[in-house]
Amino acid sequence: MQSSHAAAAVDIAFDDPNLIADAGLVPVLALAERLDLAGLVGDRVKIVGAANSGGANAGAKVMSLLGGMIAGADSIEDTDRLRHGGMAVAFDGVRAPSTLGTFLRSFTHGHVRQLHGVHRRVLVDLAAATPLLPGADVVAFVDLDSTHRQVYGYSKQGAEVGRLKGKKTLHPLLATICTPLARPVVAGVRMRKGKAADVRGAAGFVAEALATAKESGATGTIIVRADSKFYTADVVAAARRAGAHVSLTTGSNPSVDAAIAAFTGDWTPIHYPDAFVDEDTGELVSDAEVAEMPYVAFTSRPERLQVPGRLIVRRVKRLSTMDGQGELFDVYRHHAVFTTSPHTMLQAETQHRGHAVIEQVIADAKASALAHLPSASFQANAAWATLWAITHNLTRAAGVLASPFHARATTATIRAHLINVPARLARTARRLKLHLPQHWPWRNALDNLHTAVHRRPPRTA
């Protein structure tokens, strides 16, 4: 590709009032309106007495923030991309970034909890209105993980030097829901201080995520998956009270090590078509052996917190050598998972490795709205993270309605193919028409999304 030789020069002019850069916002925000998202915010988020009327018209402000995030905004200032060309024709009530910043800084902890309620209700309604979680009536996975987001400046509330040495962070906790047929959606997100322990608040958080999963159609077997940070009696007890199973990496501890050392049964060879990275060595592993053994977890705790289950242990052979002497003896690295899953050993082992899917959600977040936590206010950042969760789920629902490919695509791909599409607006009487680029490669997917969202509901007798 090179510049056109047919043109002697190229001029630019920002003078067309009927162009918009993000035409895909039209069907996605129409989907949000079908769920009455703005009305839900107005009913549940009650910010009164805030300075500069920061809490007024909460529904319109939330919709503006969501619109900016869907289009790719990763800071409050970036929401100004909603105020260009013909956006005022396509949308009403777009708020300025300064207004949105004042709104976010008006949040208290209680208001963030109210916004969590909105997020939960929107996810439930999305799952009912779209095929967001196919197969959830058979088996669903609730994945739990945390991440650190580096922040800057001296005035960030809650920012502390935690796991990232020498770097100040905030420490969100995240839960997702997925099925073998569906990409993850966000069940919940909680903002925490940078030094907060990974497992802080996890038990109650798991209980909320499981309740959300059930309301969203997960009526079959539910398995909570997490790594060793969350292998605690309280987390397992919360899952069991909700009727869910667990699949948790145990890490190395004397009880687990003793159970593995005492095992005398057979090991089953297993080959991984997609090699994975060994957590200890960083090497790619494609072959291993797997065994299972009965195990009672948390025997040092009161009897009511002791949990019978099984260990599924993967061992990977390492050859121990000395200089010039070649192989001396076989050494194995063991990776144990405690599970109460009803599935067979190999099924359960494969399912647990699927926990890595939550890392894709975290990567999506870091590439979009959670690239920054934009405010000095801790509660404003907590509200921002919750709005990202709603945005993520709306974007995933749009992908599901567009095509099978976009149902599995990353949110960045959905944004590039379906959201950030330029269009020219044309008005005739009370109809608005979007003139989109000819030969757009994802025309059919965008047409499917538009048709699914804008079709008229069937008449009722």
Image (cartoon, rainbow, N blue to C red):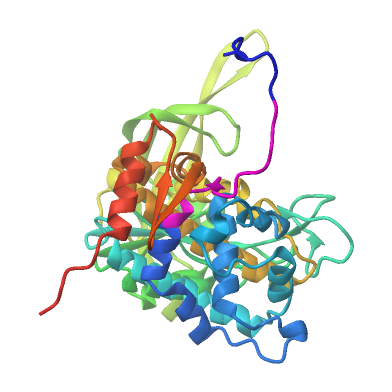
Image quarter of residue 57: bottom right
Q: Magenta includes 399? A: no
Front one among 82 and 140: 82
Is 368 on the left-hand or right-hand side of 11? left
* Magenta stretch, residue numbers: 11-26
The percent position of residue 383, horizontal first and vertical second, equals 63, 71
Q: Is residue 62 above or below residue 3?
A: below
Q: State which quarter of the image contains the N terminus.
A: top right
* Number of marks in picture: 0
Is 135 on the left-hand or right-hand side of 270? left
Q: State which quarter of the image contains the C terminus.
A: bottom left
Front one among 397 and 13: 13
Q: Is residue 192 above or below residue 146?
A: below
Which residue occupies 53% across, 54% down? 70
The percent position of residue 305, horizontal first and vertical second, equals 45, 76
Does residue 445 appear anywhere in the picture? yes
Is 370 on the left-hand or right-hand side of 59? right
Q: Magenta includes 20? A: yes
Residue that extends furthest to the right in the rendered view of this protein: 154
Front one among 261 and 141: 141
The percent position of residue 222, horizontal first and vertical second, equals 32, 64
The percent position of residue 126, horizontal first and vertical second, equals 35, 65
Q: Is residue 43 above or below residue 28?
A: below
Residue that extends furthest to the left in the rendered view of this protein: 461
Does residue 182 appear anywhere in the picture? no
Q: Is the magenta region chiefly helix, strand or loop?
A: loop
Which residue occupies 48% across, 40% down? 413
Residue that extends furthest to the front in the rendered view of this protein: 429
